[in-house]
Amino acid sequence: MKLRVNARFIFLLLLLGGLAFREVALELRPSFLRPGLHLFAYVGNTADGTLTAVDLVKLSTVSAIPVGPGPSGLRSHPTRDEIWGLSSAGGYVWVLDAKSNRIVAKIPVGSEPYALDFSRDGRRAYIAASGSNAIIAIDCATKQVVARGSAGRRPWIARVAPSGKIIVVSNRDDSSISILDAATLASLAVVPVAKQPEQLAILPDSSKVFVTSGTTNQISVVDLNRNVLLTNLSLGGTPGDLILKPDGGELYIPSADAHGLVIVNTLTNEVGDFMLLGMSPASGTFSNHDQELYISDSASGHVIPIAVGVRQAGRPIPVGQNPRTCLLTPGGDILLVVDVASNDLAVIRAKTSALITLIPVGGRPRDLAIKIF
């Protein structure tokens, strides 16, 4: 009789343990991820020219793939099971097949490319080759260069306007932006902006572009309908990242110099608000689902969640030594943060702001992309 009772007790313990394990597994699995789908993160490592593939369901590193010196500009292709990136030192675009984790193409584009962008339909990729003063268009299906254009000196970033009709390029040495025809890469206009322009944020209706300066505490606002400079806004600190609210109403700019977040009203072209955050706010990502912004602080080793509607900062989330790039998985379930000093990827449950784990990646990681396939 006693053995029978003990057997039942052990059975109940095993059953409860199994149910608990199942609940934990379901909690860690993103809510949108159906059986048979894979969710991967890809981290570019500048120390050794590799790309680390991380399985976000198993929370483990799958492989380190050589992609070439100076990996940058990582992007998930919008329609193909591919990750695209650049070898800034090698002067080419590389393409990774996500299912096999193999490089399937290397496309020469000219010296010192740093960023790429896709057309909305995913048919073309656009690259600014800074060292060659060239803008390149690539057919994503054939992996062939289909158009070349010219911008100013040291074109830094080429961005496709949401309309799909124009490409906007920041020319760092000319203190200008170039506006090109997306189909032919023919020059349509050149507009002077603040010194050494770098990052670009284009409104969803393609009416304006906001351009950061690499050397001044300014951001330029350019009317893309008339191709004229509207104003140079003073921010009170050097702009870092540009994070545009999906509806285009506000632009969030972390500034390490100002130790906070500058909020620009994109309708009035004015600084609408400022939030003091910490030591060195660096980068961020926006959750459209819950209207929350996540900002990394590179000096304090944490990420700060911000409810933008009420301008309220939440409790900082410790993530490492020098967190930089932040990105949310589709659906906003998981927040990923790259740490350039501790060489790892922080995985955070967005709903609870709880750190799930730290996954080691390569040396001096920088760029980050996410892919479901």
Image (cartoon, rainbow, N blue to C red):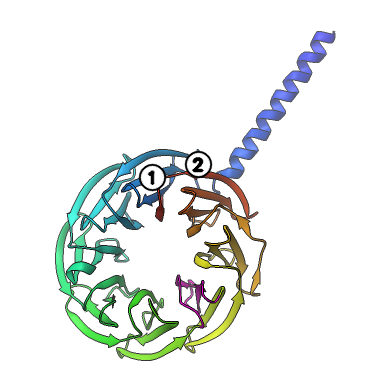
Quadrant (top left/top right/bottom left/bottom right) for the N terminus: top right
Q: Amino acid at mark 1?
A: Thr
| Residue hosting label 1 | 52
Q: Which mark is residue 272?
A: none
Q: Residues within 10 Å of mark 1 (few under 14, many from 20)?
A: many
Residue 293 percent location from the top left of the image: 56, 66
Residue 92 percent location from the top left of the image: 21, 56
- Asked whether residue 13 is drawn in magenta, I would say no
Q: Quadrant of residue 161?
A: bottom left
- Classified by dominant secondary structure, the portion drawn in magenta counts as loop
Q: Which mark is residue 57?
A: 2
Residue 307 percent location from the top left of the image: 63, 69
**309 is higher (above) or lower (below) than 102:** below
Q: Secondary structure under badge 1?
A: strand
- Front tag of 1 and 2: 1
Q: Is residue 337 visible?
A: yes
Q: Amino acid at mark 2?
A: Val
Tell me which label, 1 or 2, sits earlier in the chain.
Answer: 1
Q: Quadrant of residue 25?
A: top right
* CA separation in Å, label 1 and label 2: 15 Å
Which residue is depicted at the point 76% across and 14% down? 7
